[in-house]
Image: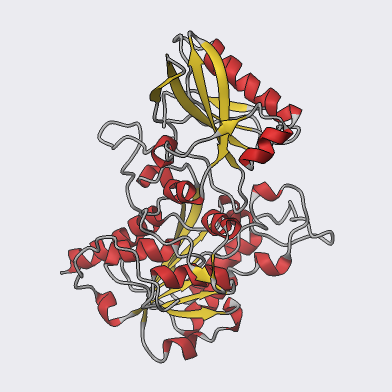
Amino acid sequence: MKNIKPFNWKRPPQLRLSLDDEIIIDNFAGGGGASMGIEQALGRSVDIAINHDPEAIAMHEANHPTTKHYVSDVFEVDPIEVCKGKPVGLAWFSPDCKHFSKAKGGKPADKKVRGLARVATKWAKLVKPRVIVLENVEEFQDWGPLLDNNKPCPVRKGLSFRRFVRDFEKLGYQVEWRELRACDFGAPTIRKRLFLIARCDNQPIVWPEDTHGKDKGLKPYNTAADCIDWTVPGSSIFLNKEEAKQFNVRRPLAEKTMTRIANGLDRYVLKAKNPFVVPFITEHANGSSQRNMPIDEPLRTICAQVKGGHFALVTGFLIKYYGTDQSVQLSDPMHTVTSRDRFGLITVSEQNYKINDILMRMLTPRELYRAQGFPDEYIIDPIYKNKKLTKVAQVRMCGNSVSPVIAAAIIKANIVNAAQMRA
């Protein structure tokens, strides 16, 4: 791991900040999304990163080699011992969100996992970071006690969250929280998360302004198509078992999957206003209704090629294997990347307005990281136990990551801009 070179992205010039004499902590650091954003904003790495997952730390260490890493449960780390008397300027927390997320459905929740956020107040009590940022799913605001069956109590919804906020306020922090979407700050994904900022330095909490969107004066959304490597081939969805084995792909597809693809083609190709194949993104899950969206909004590149002596339009759409009742177009930001590999890229070739073939492949981890807002130089396949990190682990890390562009925007607003105003 020590032989791995850091990624070669161009760092901004070192800024003269009060943080120069303070340390930066990234708790629940994962593969390094928040740390990446912090470094992009400040021009320096975080000093300490903590995570229980050794694979996540392997990725973090590959990209942030000067950081001190702890492979440990966050509650087992002693903040006083870690900081060694140095003042903490910034502490970032991204506790496990799956037991708050609506994606969990009606399954029982784990009280211990739901209480992981309290490690932030532990750090506030013991070392009092000047600025604290916490990221979680939007449902984190509903954090409350569980019933005997480990289901959230509907009557006391949000009670634990309000107590959590009051704990910070009792320690002298002002606290604000807001939901932000990654696509509004330049990442080609609509991933929305709740961000809570607490600070105790008598400076105002500042929320970054959107940089991308459909409103006048904003940059256009970066799209899912921007993430796709169009040189990576797909394979026909019509392959039989023997042909599928030859190409090492999963075929034939299930009947329901084929039906969903056909429904998408019917709506966005056969019934399209323009007489040619239109790319789109679709989402589906077992037993759910299909969700489709047209291409004229924020993931779009249309490629043309000559095939079999005829001109053919090659285009694509994405399929999500979960969710209900909505789809995403290729020109839209990609929907939130989860920690399981659930995206498939479909491309369609047509001749004389008739479809000759439909190609499908899963999106690569690199494409998913692009959608999340990571630079291509970011190392996503570090060596772990003498082997490159598996694709499954790479996708999991991406799904669990903080979009660096939002982290950078928040830190610029509350650290960089504040320091420049005081100078």
Q: Position of residue 294 (x, y in %)?
A: 49, 23
Q: How many marks?
A: 0
* The N terminus, quarter of image: bottom left
Q: Taking 271 as reference, is 81 above or below it?
A: below
Q: Is residue 174 rendered to the left or right of residue 364?
A: left
- Residue 166 visible in image: no
Q: Position of residue 208 (x, y in %)?
A: 33, 52
> Which residue is nearer to you in this view: 189 or 122?
189
User: Quarter-wise, where is residue 210 in the image?
Assistant: top left
> Which residue is nearer to you in this view: 12 or 266?
266
Q: Residue at x 43, y 39 (%)?
A: 228
Q: Position of residue 328 (x, y in %)?
A: 52, 31
Q: Residue at x 33, y 73 (%)?
A: 201
> Which colour assignment does the render follow?
secondary structure
* The C terminus, quarter of image: bottom left
Q: Position of residue 155 (x, y in %)?
A: 73, 53
User: Quarter-wise, where is residue 324 in the image?
Assistant: top right
> Which residue is nearer to you in this view: 57 or 82?
57
Q: Residue at x 79, y 60 (%)?
A: 150
Q: Residue at x 56, y 38 (%)?
A: 361
Q: Residue furthest left?
A: 423
